């Protein structure tokens, strides 16, 4: 059970949610592959490859090396895409694609946290063009997401400006806590993946949701609650979500955070290949 409505004279708190397989039942980015295909952004071969990647993701999750391969593939794939076209496709298909795959249990938790006076922050490795409208759909107060570099022509260059993954998620949470005066010791976090251990460790109330094998082992060892979300339901069938402005926190992330994350990825890569 969540604590009752908070006394606003006390420090503010928030609930931080990973997105894929935590709030929604699939990968948010890969879910739009068919729409991107029909919009002419990807060819049939790429559409089939992303469908297969989605299957692998759903079957067993994605470890660090798989996430790295997915990042490189998607970064190369979106090079040259017109950003406004991507936003338009996401806006046109958002309700049809995302609404049916939102976990009922996650939607309930979001509602409970808002009722308790907490902000809700979506923290996702997926791109901002996808995560921001999903955050708005969910009624999130803020969003942290990966940001791609956009050229003067309004198209993605294929370079990553900010990668919301691993320790950079935790750093984003700490920077938000400082700017918004969140008391992290009383904040909540939810994720399905061991790659989000830094994010879970940053708060006083971490929760493992549909955890992969490594995260389940860690959660059991540390006594963290393990939640099973398995009932996707259309959001409009549950409750009316009040529109809330989804703010992109990634813009405020310092270069030190990104550098720390890249060092962490490199060290993990060296260990994996040693």
Image: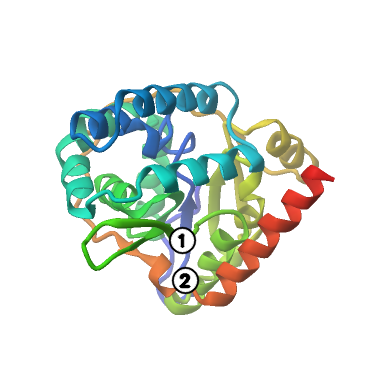
Kindly identify the residue that appears in the image at 65 percent across and 41 percent down: 65
Q: Give the left or right position of residue 262, taking residue 36 as reference.
A: right
- Closer mark to the observer between disc 2 and disc 1: 2
Q: Which residue is mark 1?
A: 14
Coloring applied to the structure: rainbow
Q: Can you tell which quarter of the image residue 251 is in?
A: bottom left
Q: Is residue 251 above or below residue 110?
A: below
Q: Is residue 47 above or below residue 72?
A: above
Residue 155 appears in view: yes
Q: Can you tell which quarter of the image residue 272 is in?
A: top right
Q: CA distance from mark 2 to mark 1?
A: 10 Å
Kindly identify the residue that appears in the image at 18 percent across and 40 percent down: 89
Kindly identify the residue that appears in the image at 22 percent across and 37 percent down: 94
Q: Give the left or right position of residue 226, taking residue 163 as reference.
A: right
**Residue 176 got which mark?**
2
Q: Are the residues at dot 2 and dot 1 in contact (C-beta closer than 8 Å)?
A: yes
Question: Foreground: 113 or 141?
Answer: 141
Secondary structure under badge 1?
strand
- Residue 114 x/y as whole percent: 35, 54
């Amino acid at each position: 059970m969540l604590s009752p409505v908070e006394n606003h004279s006390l420090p503010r708190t928030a609930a931080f949610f990973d997105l894929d397989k935590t709030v929604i039942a699939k990968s948010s980015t890969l879910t739009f592959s068919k729409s991107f295909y029909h919009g002419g952004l990807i060819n049939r071969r790429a559409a089939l490859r992303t469908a297969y990647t989605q299957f692998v993701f759903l079957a067993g999750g994605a470890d660090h090396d798989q996430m790295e391969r997915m990042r490189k593939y998607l970064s190369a794939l979106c090079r040259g895409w017109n950003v406004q076209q991507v936003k338009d496709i996401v806006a046109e298909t958002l309700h049809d694609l995302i609404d049916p795959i939102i976990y009922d249990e996650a939607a309930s938790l979001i509602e409970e946290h808002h009722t308790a006076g907490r902000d809700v922050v979506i923290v996702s490795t997926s791109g901002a063009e996808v995560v921001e409208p999903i955050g708005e759909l969910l009624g999130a107060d803020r969003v942290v997401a990966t940001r791609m570099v956009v050229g003067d022509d309004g198209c993605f260059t294929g370079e990553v400006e900010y990668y919301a993954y691993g320790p950079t998620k935790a750093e984003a949470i700490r920077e938000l806590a400082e700017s918004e005066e969140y008391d992290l010791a009383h904040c909540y976090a939810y994720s399905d993946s061991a790659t989000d251990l830094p994010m879970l460790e940053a708060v006083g109330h971490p929760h493992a949701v549909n955890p992969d094998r490594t995260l389940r082992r860690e959660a059991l060892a540390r006594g963290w609650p393990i939640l099973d979300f398995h009932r996707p339901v259309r959001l409009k069938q549950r409750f009316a979500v009040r529109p809330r402005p989804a703010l992109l926190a990634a813009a405020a992330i310092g270069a030190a955070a990104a550098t720390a994350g890249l060092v962490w990825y490199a060290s993990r890569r060296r260990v994996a290949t040693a």
